[in-house]
Amino acid sequence: MSGADDLARAKEAARVAARARREQAHRDLGATAPALFAEHFFHDLPLPRHGVIAGYVPLNHEADPGELLAEAGKRGYRTCLPRVAAKASPLRFLQWAPGDPLAAGAHGTKEPMTGRPELQPDIIIVPMLAYEPGGLRLGYGGGYYDRTLAALRAAGRQVLAVGLAYAEQGTDHLPEDPHDERLDWIVTERRAISFAKP
């Protein structure tokens, strides 16, 4: 059995455990957490005065950035959502604001309607199954956010990758692939944590 097989098995085991923790946290906190996410995001992060914030439409007990995105619009930020352009390609981000119509996307996601302007985000709010203290994130295995962040960073874009999660999604250690991109911040219902190196 190869090291890659061992890593794949370790990641799948971590996903099973993480889904259970996230589901419980969502049952306990799903109604109150969105306002707390927004509060910590705008109070604690070093945000530009204006710019583009990319969010997502939550699925399967994901932390909900809806109130955060609504508040962003009130504060003068433009907001957008990801759209899967092609398998194994970076995400594209199309302009969207709360209340705008959505279309069905890949993997059961919801995306902006075709024809919306494409934006370049300054801040990307990233969904996940789990995170660990070094800023590593456990996703679903498709690699979309890793490819997107890698491409933006390689192009010199000063993009801020902000994970959004319940505090209970934190764990001490996650298995890591060489292509895994780390987060700059994590925002939970309890606080915001920076992963910037001193």
Image: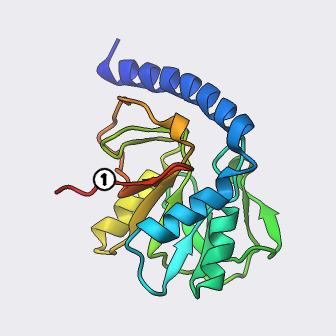
Q: Secondary structure at mark 1?
A: loop
User: Could you tell me which residue is drawn at 65 percent across and 51 percent down?
Assistant: 33
Quadrant the C terminus occupies: bottom left
| Residue 104 image position (x, y, % from top left) | 79, 59
| Residue 41 image position (x, y, % from top left) | 50, 65
Q: Nearer the viewer, residue 99 or 143?
A: 99
Q: Residues within 10 Å of mark 1 (few under 14, many from 20)?
A: some
List the residue tagged with mark 1: 195
In this picture, is 62 found above or below 4? below
Quadrant of the image occupied by residue 85: bottom right
Residue extending furthest toward the top: 1
User: Could you tell me which residue is drawn at 72 percent across and 81 percent down?
Assistant: 115
Can I make out residue 30 in this image? Answer: yes
Q: Nearer the viewer, residue 144 or 170?
A: 170
Residue 51 located left or right of residue 118: left
Residue 83 located left or right of residue 136: right
